Amino acid sequence: MKSSELRNALEEYLDLLKRNLDAVSLEILKTKYKKPFDELRQNISSTATAYVKQVTLDNIRIRADFMAEAQPLIQSTVDQSDILKQISAAAFKRQDIAEIDQLTLSLKEQIHQALLPFYDRHICLYLDDECFGNPPKAPKFYNVASGCMWKNNAWTPAEVEKGVILLPAQDKPKTAA
């Protein structure tokens, strides 16, 4: 499902929960209407989880062979942020989709910031035939973790061409004090 479809489904579930809570007490929902109420809570939980996951990980490119390195960074960011608890409260206590949207985007930004050093470690100089031509051209930058090339001030998905040399980019040398 697309994130917009997940959001719409979540919004409908939250609206139904709000109407139910306006009509009867939480205690009655938990006892007299236990089965449908539990089903609604499960639907809210699973849809919110899918929505948050889809939005936060959208446009994050990590090649499968780098996932073991990146996944703990993402997970620790999620765990340390406490945002999932806030999203749960926004859903179940306030039925506030706008707050869920805001928290989800905040989590997305935190994950993005946490991944920047990871991506920086995997930048290489992309030396193709043009770099050795006459006149030689400057090498391009390629990120082996994301499979992207730096073009027109943006990282763009690109395949490594046959015969290309990838050299790890070095940190700038520190100047003597």
Image (spheres, rainbow, N blue to C red):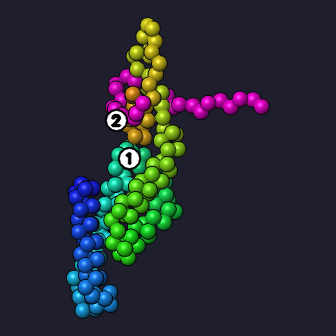
Question: How many tags in the picture?
Answer: 2
Q: Which residue is mark 1?
A: 60
Dot 1, how many residues are within 10 Å of its Cα: few (below 14), some (14-19), or many (20+)? few
Q: Residue at x 34, y 50 (%)?
A: 58
Inter-mark Cα distance, 2 to 1: 11 Å
Q: Is residue 157 magenta?
A: yes
- Res 7 visible: yes
Q: The residue tagged with tag 2: helix, strand or loop?
A: strand
- Res 165 visible: no
Q: Residue at x 57, y 31 (%)?
A: 170
Q: Residue 76, how many percent across, how many down? A: 50, 59
Q: Which residue is mark 2?
A: 157
Q: Residue at x 23, y 88 (%)?
A: 33
Relative to 113, residue 98 above or below: below
Q: Residue furthest top?
A: 134
Relative to 96, residue 114 above or below: above
Asked whether the beta carbons under mark 2 and mark 1 sit within 8 Å of each other, the answer is: no
Please identify the quarter of the rendering in which residue 9 is found.
bottom left
Q: Residue 10, how many percent across, how many down? A: 27, 66
Quadrant (top left, top right, bottom left, bottom right) of the N terminus: bottom left
The residue stretch that appears in magenta: 153-177
